[in-house]
């Protein structure tokens, strides 16, 4: 798996020392210093190769150094990188049109471009406030971002408590509980905000019935249904958006991560003229959002997903991965959840951090999203043979982890 060099580790140590002296330590000390990548592989500054099954946390959908994305960004950089929002550009208009098309949005729908998923959620909060109501319902286990508005919707106490009091009127209800949702939605509810699959919460999917119930309840109450497709969107689950698999059309949807293939971009999509009209001219804005460079990247991503049949591949690769994991017959592996190429392998003990560390030593990058769950969000171009490298290594990784944790 690995391609070590005689100086393995020396460059990494030097760069991490410089990192410690120059970067604000909000992420802790990084595990690696990566230099370049190709497809589903990355190399560190010491020449060691790793199979990237993290995918920049569901961002690098085309993998690393994909020629279509490189060509689009290079071409646009030579033409026009940025203009103010006094003006628009051809890539911005074209990407908005394409997003509305793949989202199946009706006439009167619209797109607001920003730079990240968190910013898209901030726009969604403003949209909800424009209903004239104050209450927002989110779910326990939810992650919607770390800026103060988005953080109010995020459930994890460790993220929230240092910055409270946060935005008032936010209520968290048990995830997947239709009765709890029903009892919480009322005349003061401006929006219900849900992830079709809770990514940071452990890759925990909503059932189609739960999403449909949320749609019915919000429609009846005159509230907005806002779906956070930041991690699940742009093909990650095998359809353009995860909500499409449940047949649910939201009032608004947030998108980011995979949309730019690694170039920062986010978006709020409003569905229909009534919702679109809630945010009027001057009520929201951005300096960098929707710049020509990021929109050219977004167009290249959408075009390449279609040209290479990656939606079909994501479904097939995800099903292959599920069969292989379940076929291990290892009692320490309790299952696999998620959809497409957003998956969590669940474990019988709290071994995930140790498994991830041993995997990294073996040249495979995975994410311990929970103490007992390993998240996989690889590039869409990952092959089944590459996924098999992880599955085949998993029993040995578990041997090392369980021995270490005795």
Image (cartoon, rainbow, N blue to C red):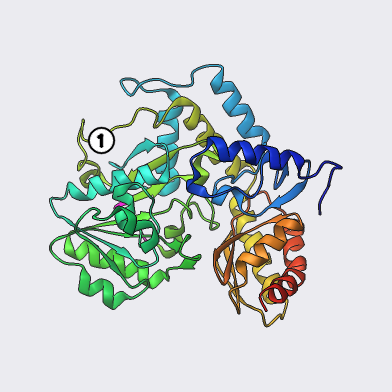
Quadrant housing residue 15: top right
Residue linked to disc 1: 284
Most extreme residue toward the right is: 6
Task: Answer with left or right where residue 297 lies relative to residue 95.
Answer: right
Task: Answer with left or right where residue 168 lies relative to residue 333.
Answer: left
Eyeballing the image, is 191 above or below 71? below
Name the element at disc 1: loop
Task: Answer with left or right where residue 56 lies relative to residue 180.
Answer: right
The residue depicted at 53 percent of the width and 58 percent of the height is: 237
Q: Can residue 401 be seen in this view?
A: yes
Q: Which of 398 and 262 is in front in this view?
A: 398
The residue depicted at 16 percent of the width and 66 percent of the height is: 186
The residue depicted at 36 percent of the width and 50 percent of the height is: 253
Eyeballing the image, is 60 above or below 395? above
Q: Residue 361's x, y, as percent?
A: 74, 57
Say if the magenta span includes residue 219.
no
Q: Can residue 249 be seen in this view?
A: no
Task: Answer with left or right where residue 29 lies relative to residue 288.
Answer: right
Q: Which quadrant, please, contains the C terminus?
A: bottom right
Quadrant housing residue 268: top left
Q: How many labels does the image show?
A: 1
- Which span is picked out in magenta? 248-252
Disc 1 residue crowd, few under 14, some 14–19, many 20+, Cα 10 Å: few
Q: Residue 93's x, y, as percent?
A: 40, 29
Most extreme residue toward the top is: 79
Say if the magenta span includes residue 249.
yes
Eyeballing the image, is 355 above or below 240? below
> Main SS type for the magenta part?
loop
Q: Residue 13's x, y, as percent?
A: 70, 42
């Amino acid at each position: 798996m690995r391609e070590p060099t005689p100086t393995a580790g020396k460059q990494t140590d030097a760069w991490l020392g410089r990192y410690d002296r120059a970067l604000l330590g909000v992420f802790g000390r990084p595990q690696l210093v990566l230099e370049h990548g190709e497809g589903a592989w990355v190399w560190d500054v010491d020449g060691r190769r790793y199979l990237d099954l993290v995918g920049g946390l569901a961002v690098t959908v085309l993998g690393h150094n994909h020629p279509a994305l490189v060509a689009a960004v290079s071409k646009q950089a030579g033409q026009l990188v940025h203009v103010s929002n006094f003006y628009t550009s051809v890539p911005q208009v074209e990407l908005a049109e394409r997003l509305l098309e793949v989202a199946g949005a009706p006439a009167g729908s619209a797109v607001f471009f920003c730079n990240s998923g968190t910013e898209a959620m901030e726009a969604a909060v403003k949209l909800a406030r424009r209903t004239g109501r104050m209450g927002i319902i989110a779910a326990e286990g939810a992650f919607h971002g770390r800026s103060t508005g988005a953080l109010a919707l995020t459930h994890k106490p460790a993220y929230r408590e240092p910055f409270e009091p946060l935005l008032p009127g936010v209520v968290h209800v048990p995830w997947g509980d239709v009765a709890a949702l029903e009892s919480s939605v009322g005349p003061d509810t401006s929006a219900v905000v849900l992830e079709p699959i809770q990514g940071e919460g452990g890759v925990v999917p909503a059932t189609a019935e739960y999403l449909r119930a949320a749609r019915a309840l919000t429609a009846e109450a005159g509230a907005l249904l806002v779906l956070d497709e930041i991690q699940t969107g742009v093909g990650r689950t095998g359809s353009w958006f995860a909500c499409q698999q449940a047949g649910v059309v939201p009032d608004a949807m947030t998108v980011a991560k995979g949309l730019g293939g690694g170039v920062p971009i986010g978006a709020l999509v409003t569905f229909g003229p009534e919702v679109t009209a809630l945010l009027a001219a001057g009520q929201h804005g951005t300096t960098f959002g929707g710049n020509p460079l990021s929109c050219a990247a977004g167009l290249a991503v959408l075009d390449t997903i279609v040209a290479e049949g990656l939606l079909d591949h994501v479904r097939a690769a995800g099903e292959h991965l599920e069969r292989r994991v379940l076929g291990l017959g290892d009692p320490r592996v309790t299952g696999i959840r998620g959809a497409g190429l957003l998956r969590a392998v669940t474990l019988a003990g709290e071994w995930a951090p140790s498994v991830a560390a041993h995997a990294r030593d073996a040249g495979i990058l995975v994410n311990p999203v929970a103490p007992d769950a390993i998240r996989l969000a690889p590039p869409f171009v990952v092959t089944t043979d590459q996924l098999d490298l992880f599955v085949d290594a998993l029993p040995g990784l578990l041997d090392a982890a369980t021995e270490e944790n005795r």
